[in-house]
Image (spheres, rainbow, N blue to C red):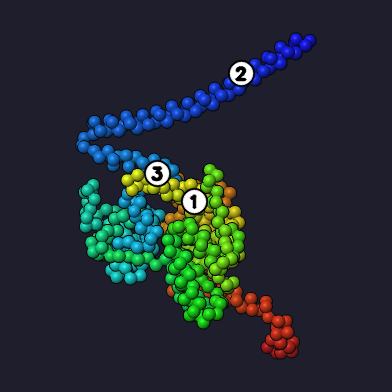
Amino acid sequence: MMMRRQRIRLLLTFLSGVVVAGIVSIVAGTVGSVAATRYEDLNLFTSVMNLVRRNYVEEIDEGRLVRGALRGMLEELDPHSSFLDADAYHEMQVDTKGEFHGLGIEITKRRDGFIEVVSPIEGTPAQRAGVRARDEIVAICPTERPADWTEECRSTKNMTLFEAVNLMRGSRGSKITIEILRESFEKPQRFTIARDVVKVVSVSGRVLEPGYAYVRIRAFQERTIQDLQKVLETLHKEGGGQPFQGLVLDMRDNPGGLLDQAVKVADAWLSEGLVVYTKGRVDSQLHEFRAHSQGTEPSYPIVVLVNEGTASASEIVAGALQDHRRALVIGVQTFGKGSVQTVYPLEAGNGLRLTTALYYTPGGRSIQEVGISPDIVVQAPDRRPEAGGEEGESPERVRERDLERHFTQEDASPTEPLEAPGPGAAAAGYPDDVQLGRAVEVLKSWTYFERLRNAPETALQAKAPAPAEAEAR
């Protein structure tokens, strides 16, 4: 019996060894299979490259082919990952600094594939030439055309925003012609514009009326938080050093920018807690960004204005202030870009922009594909839904959910709005900007009810009419 038990134990030990060896063999085989597949793919790429080099009808620039292959590889991922050649990488760095040579217009993509002017920047060549918001740029005709161009002008239909920006920028004093279609035009008209130095002021502000301030953030650049602090300091001085009764923070058509600047801007109105956190496939992409009490603004009411063009970093600020109940968000559903791109410098001045994480608001919401839902829905008159459009949105504006290969969010559940006024709801004093007018109305109502809530009970009783007087009235 003892001998039999020993033999069984030895047999089980042997079988265990066989199983472990089998697992190791399977793992090794899997790793070897992956390596073999990668080698075959690289071998395939080399074979195609050699065939093109030997047999293509014309001489080729092999470097150009490799860069094209890299662009194609990144295009298989999501719409925000891309290979940046030296020129594109330089342009990206210029954008974050807020100064460049060009026309001075903010542009976006229309659903029909063409380029639309969001707005000309004040004091720039485009504004002086008469370019207006909502103009449709149907073609670009640069004076110095790339070597592969055979036509004088190139249609912007299906042209990427980067391609359009790259064509419209150039050395100071050089000229470019763009064809614009406007609602009042029977056919596209040509605008020839001389490029100049364009300085994008990321933050501006003004006093709307006594006690109520307005701050506009156009983009999140390297010095946005410093610019914001200067604007707020100036506005406080103009108000005699008294706390604001209310502030409108306008981030409509703000395409985003630097994450660290968005965090610092939100921190200006938050004294503690999460501002945003990011989470990716690897643990190194898990980051938490928190607010600090130092330098926090006084506790006055805030309304944040957003629209379809509010994206990325501006959505982070809106979401943080909304989740902390520090501000009410007014406007329409935002763009919905909830992904984080990390930029890696490469050889020869090239770069790689790669989506490495998704970000989440303090309440744990991912706004990817769904955007920030406003607390109060107010649509601008020129953003009325047409046939087939949804409430509060223009059928022509592109959002994240319209982009190919975007990350989806199956379980997104936007918060319900408090109120949904009809299109064109006006507010006294701001007939040209319905959303701003509604924001001021909300701030005034807010401060009124705050005063009412904090008033002594005896003061409220003194103001109440006697029953007889009430009946007489």
| Crowding at mark 1 (Cα within 10 Å: few <14, some 14-19, many 20+) | many
Find the distance from the CA under tag 1 to the CA under tag 2.
47 Å
* Element on which disc 1 rests: strand
Find the distance from the CA under tag 1 to the CA under tag 3.
16 Å
The image quadrant of residue 143 is bottom left
The mark found on residue 18 in the picture is: 2
**Camera-nearest label, 2 or 3:** 2
Residue occupying the point 21% across, 37% down: 59
The picture places residue 206, in percent across and down from the top left corner, at: 45, 75
Amino acid bearing label 2: Val
Q: Residue furthest right?
A: 1
User: Is there a contact, CB below 8 Å, between mark 1 and mark 2?
Assistant: no
Q: In what quadrant of the picture does the C terminus appear?
A: bottom right
- Which mark sits nearer the N-terminus, 1 or 3? 3
Q: Which residue is mark 3?
A: 75
Relative depth, front residue between 373 and 111: 373
